[in-house]
Amino acid sequence: MEKISIKQIIQGNEDLYVVSGEGEQGAREDYDGPRTVAAILKALKKERCNGDRWAYITDGQFRAEA
């Protein structure tokens, strides 16, 4: 999956998903929050649990990390 910036990913019309997990296992959840960089950064920070987990946002084709 190609990496792009959060700003680029929110400009599309596609549905967004937060993918997060520990180790190599992860789960995908619908992202229904505001389509702003600040809101997505906050959601990813929450999913990371102070560094215990990893997280990124995706539209299914591209992904963006903070």
Image (spheres, rainbow, N blue to C red):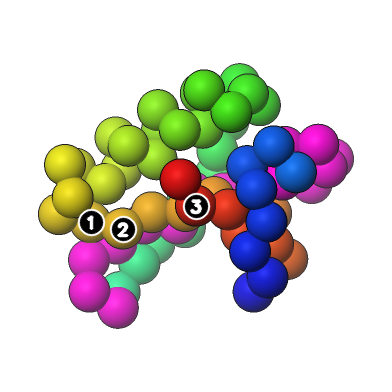
Q: Which residue is mark 1?
A: 53
Relative to 9, is 11 above or below? above
Q: Are marks 2 and 3 in contact (CB under 8 Å)?
A: no
Q: Which residues are magenta?
A: 9-24
Give SS at disc 3: loop
**Amino acid tagged 2:** Trp
Asked where in the image residue 4 lies, by quadrant, the reply is: bottom right
Asked if the stretch drawn in magenta spans residue 12, the answer is yes
The x, y position of residue 39, in whole percent, is 51, 23
**Looking at the picture, how far across and down is residue 59, in whole percent?**
69, 54
Q: Is residue 50 left or right of residue 1?
A: left
* Mark 1 element type: loop
At 65% from the left and 48% from the top, the residue drawn is 5
**Residue placed under numbered mark 2 in the picture:** 54
Q: What separation in Å lies between label 3 and label 1 (alpha carbons)? A: 13 Å
Viewed as shown, does residue 30 lie left or right of 26? right
Q: In the image, residue 33 lies at what x, y percent?
A: 55, 25
Instruction: Name which of mark 2 and mark 3 comes first in the sequence.
Output: 2
Task: State yes or no: discs 2 and 1 in contact (Cβ < 8 Å).
Answer: yes
Instruction: Using the image as rendered, state which of residue 5 and residue 16 is in the foreground.
Output: 5
> What percent of the width, then of the height, locates residue 1?
64, 74
Q: Quadrant of residue 63?
A: bottom right
